[in-house]
Amino acid sequence: EIQAALLRVKLRLLPELTTERRAIAAQYLAGMQSDHITLPALREGAEHVYHQFVVRTAMRNQFKAYLLEHGIDTVIHYPIPPHLAECYAHLGYGRGSFPVAEQYADEVLSLPIFNGMRADEIDYVIDTVNAYAGECAVHVSICVLTYRPDYEKLFMTLTSIIRQQGCSYEIIIADDGTLDFRQDLIEAWMAARGITDYYIVRNMENRGTVRN
């Protein structure tokens, strides 16, 4: 296979490639000075090959959108902690079982790092990160009304939203006391996907049909 042939050649260059990635990471670590992100830390006695350069931020959606607006693509490599993955559902773990892992999954974001990265590209990433003011702009605000709710359509809509790359969003689910509203279904669907940034607004008294 072509990939296998390329990797056989690349393996012979692995020490040089690793040295290059470490040099890029060293520039990132020395140059990035932002209170809005947590940089990767190196444990004493350990070494890092920096296959990825992963930072953490509590405002990941906003930060990701900000970087994309400035031409910097980022990746969320591990958005779901293992215990919340569908393949491990039979173990019975839920949201809250491993809070540290869940927090990291909600916050991790991989910045660009690759062999052949130019000095001006490295400097641009550093300068753009440092210029981030921590704004909490929301690009998409969706309010889902649950009168006669169709949960299949609701979940399809939510799936299309959370798959948007570089788009920060908030989800508000509003209910006016409908008897067939299943908050537990929505909460279970969100928890299974590790989603926490949503609101459910309920009026426990049904006030009838709203006329336009």
Image: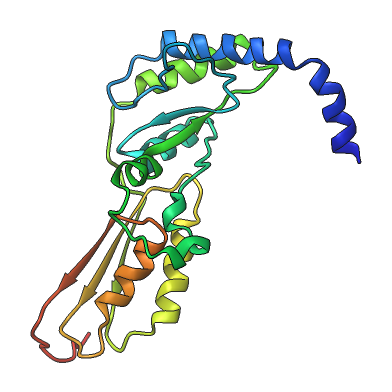
The front one of 188 and 111 is 188
Q: Is residue 51 above or below residue 81?
A: above
Q: Is residue 25 above or below residue 76?
A: above
The front one of 5 and 36 is 5
Q: Is residue 5 left or right of residue 27?
A: right
Numbered circles on residues, count: 0
Measured as percent of width and height from the top left, residue 97 is found at 30, 53
Q: Quadrant of residue 5?
A: top right
Measured as percent of width and height from the top left, residue 172 is found at 26, 64
Measured as percent of width and height from the top left, residue 47 is found at 53, 15
Q: Residue at x 55, y 34 (%)?
A: 73
Q: Residue at x 51, y 48 (%)?
A: 165
Q: Quadrant of the C terminus?
A: bottom left
Q: Is residue 169 left or right of residue 152?
A: left
Q: Quadrant of the N terminus?
A: top right
The front one of 205 and 190 is 190
The front one of 194 and 134 is 194
Measured as percent of width and height from the top left, residue 131 is found at 36, 20
Q: Residue at x 8, y 85 (%)?
A: 205
Q: Residue at x 59, y 19 (%)?
A: 49
Q: Quadrant of residue 62?
A: top left
Q: Is residue 1 above or below residue 143?
A: above
